[in-house]
């Protein structure tokens, strides 16, 4: 039972168990089309007993890793590092947004590689970044199409579509079954 002092977030959590939909995927909408914000209370929204609220279930976010070399979280990894991810915040449906991110760093340069790893900890982050820069690029685009084997995307910086083979990716989050 809802009370006037409940927030929309409280209501979403209450709906999670019986409906099986995580709060982050729920969009609660009033008859006039306004989307309820999680921090609003039912009293602030003037929602009374018997009011009609529609839940729109948003697709799950899908995150795919297409390249992974080395470990960015391991400060002792002095070899080359590369991580390429594709984030689909609204799933893999045609027209959905996509965010491509590439992080890359070459192996530790020879002028630094001879040092003992403990010595490298004494260097400031600024010094390490100067000697050993990490390349970071983010490009946004949209999904053109998807099926059980591939996802075709168009990135704003590239004219041609990029086709990802789902078999060669690592799925980091989401339900690729529901998305495809």
Image (tube, grey):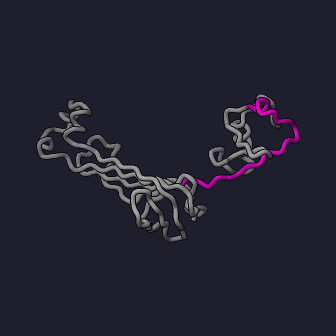
> Is the N terminus in the top left, top right, bottom left or bottom right quadrant?
top right
Q: Which residues are magenta?
A: 41-61
Q: Is residue 54 above or below residue 130?
A: below
Image-based side of 102 in relation to 55, left or right: left
* Image quadrant in which you'd find residue 44: top right
- For image coordinates 35% across by 56% down, the residue present is 68
Q: Nearer the viewer, residue 51 or 180?
A: 51
Magenta span dominant secondary structure: loop
The x and y percentages for residue 30 are: 77, 44
- x and y percentages locating residue 19 in the rendered image: 73, 51
Residue 94 versus residue 39 in the image, above or below: below
Relative placement, left or right, of 69 versus 8 is left
* Residue depicted at 21% across the width and 31% down the height: 123
Q: Is residue 159 above or below residue 134?
A: below
- Residue 56 located within the stretch drawn in magenta: yes
Residue 172's spot in the image, x, y percent?
Answer: 48, 54
């Amino acid at each position: 039972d809802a009370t006037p002092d409940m927030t929309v977030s409280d209501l979403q959590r209450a709906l999670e168990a019986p409906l099986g939909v995580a709060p982050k995927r729920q969009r609660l909408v009033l008859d006039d089309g306004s989307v309820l914000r999680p921090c609003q209370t039912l009293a602030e929204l003037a929602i009374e007993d018997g009011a009609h609220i529609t839940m729109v279930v948003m697709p799950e976010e899908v995150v795919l890793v297409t390249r992974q070399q080395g470990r960015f979280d391991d400060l002792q990894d002095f070899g080359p590092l590369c991580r390429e991810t594709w984030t689909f915040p609204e799933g893999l449906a045609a027209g959905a947004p996509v965010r491509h991110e590439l992080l890359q760093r070459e192996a530790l340069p020879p002028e630094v590689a001879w040092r003992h790893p403990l010595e490298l900890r004494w260097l400031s982050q600024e010094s390490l970044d100067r000697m050993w820069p990490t390349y970071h690029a983010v490009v946004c685009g949209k999904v053109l199409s998807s099926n059980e084997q591939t996802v075709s995307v168009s990135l704003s910086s590239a004219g041609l579509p990029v086709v990802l083979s789902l078999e060669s990716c690592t799925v980091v989050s989401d339900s690729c079954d529901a998305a495809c």
